[in-house]
Amino acid sequence: MLVVVALFVVQVIYASGVIVGKFVLPVVPAPVIVTIRMVIATIAFFLAHRAIKGSVPRTAGDWLRFALMGVLGGAGNQLLVLLGLTRTTAINAAILIPMIPIFTVIFGWAFWRARPSALKWAGVAVAAAGTVYLIGPDRVSLAPEVALGNILVLSGMAFNALAFLLAKDMLQRYAPVTVAFCLTLTGLLGVFPLGIGAAGNVERAALTPGFLLWLGYLVVFPTTVTYFLNLWALRRASPTLVTSFIYLQPLFTTAVAPLVLQGETLTARMAAAGLAIFAGVAVVILAEKRQQSTSTR
């Protein structure tokens, strides 16, 4: 029961982070937010790594792999999502986030030679159709900023999926907290110059005490807190259960965003695209469960 509560809280935090980001990003640029996030997460995971006395990677190959994970799944993923959020709606961003399992299937086949079943390919096709419909090639000339924002968020999901696949091998050799520390450290080194360069664009006059509280929430909760809760849940539940909770995030965002954000409405197009993406992901998860049950017989 505690695992379910933890995973529920994770999705509420992620969903609220998308909404809070719409308030914060006009004042604080995305590279600055990501840099602060990575600094705090690196310190937190370093302390946790020291507490468990985890082993430190000693080979150049492992550090190179961690660097790639940090660029893709740490700084790169967050930066692309926040940059996309400045151009698209919170609802659009939330609808695209469940594409992570779809990209995992595609990249696993392309780079790790994992052969998906026909059912998995069917799920990928349905989700891809929903994504194309949401981004809308026909809308690029009419709303180029929204289309670009959707593509940036989608690219962030692709980065996340690649980092997840890279992390699978490292998690077999290092403790999860150590993996998280190395990932955030290398991600911080990559994004730090961008954060320093964008610091001059912060609207300092808008940094009121109330705003700083929201900024603090956006910096700490969707990264460090959710990382800890996900790691805790992964030690007590299957990856399938953990990833299945991602469905809740779009539901929370679409329910709350229209109430607090001006111009946020759930259109028929968004709903149709979202249903297609959810259906596609559900088919992929079903195919994964069938494959696991077959392999254990």
Image (spheres, grey):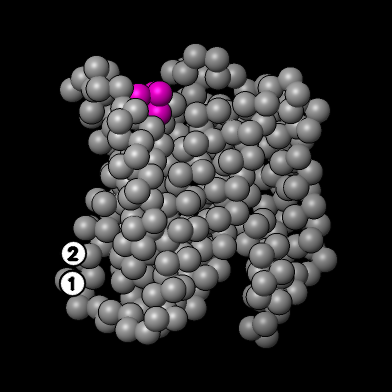
- Between marks 2 and 1, how big is the CA–CA gap? 5 Å
Percent across and percent down for residue 75 are 42, 52
Q: Please name whichever residue, 181 or 95, is drawn nearer the observer in this view of the structure.
A: 181
Judging by the rendered image, the residue that carries numbered circle 1 is 50
Image quadrant occupied by the N terminus:
bottom left
Corner quadrant of residue 64: bottom left
Residues marked 2 and 1 touching at CB (< 8 Å): yes
Number of numbered discs: 2
Left or right, residue 71 beside residue 87: left
Q: Please name whichever residue, 157 or 295, is drawn nearer the observer in this view of the structure.
A: 157
Corner quadrant of residue 205: top left
Left or right, residue 262 beside residue 115: left
Q: Which residues, given as a range, are shown in magenta?
A: 23-27
Left or right, residue 119 beside residue 17: right
Crowd class of label 2 (few under 14; some 14 to 19; many from 20; radius 10 Å): some
Q: Which mark is residue 193?
A: none
Q: Please name whichever residue, 95 or 85, is drawn nearer the observer in this view of the structure.
A: 85
Q: Which mark is residue 47?
A: 2
> Which residue type does callout 2 highlight?
Leu
Q: Secondary structure at mark 1?
A: helix
The prevailing secondary structure element of the residues shown in magenta is loop
Image point 55% across, 48% down: which residue?
A: 156
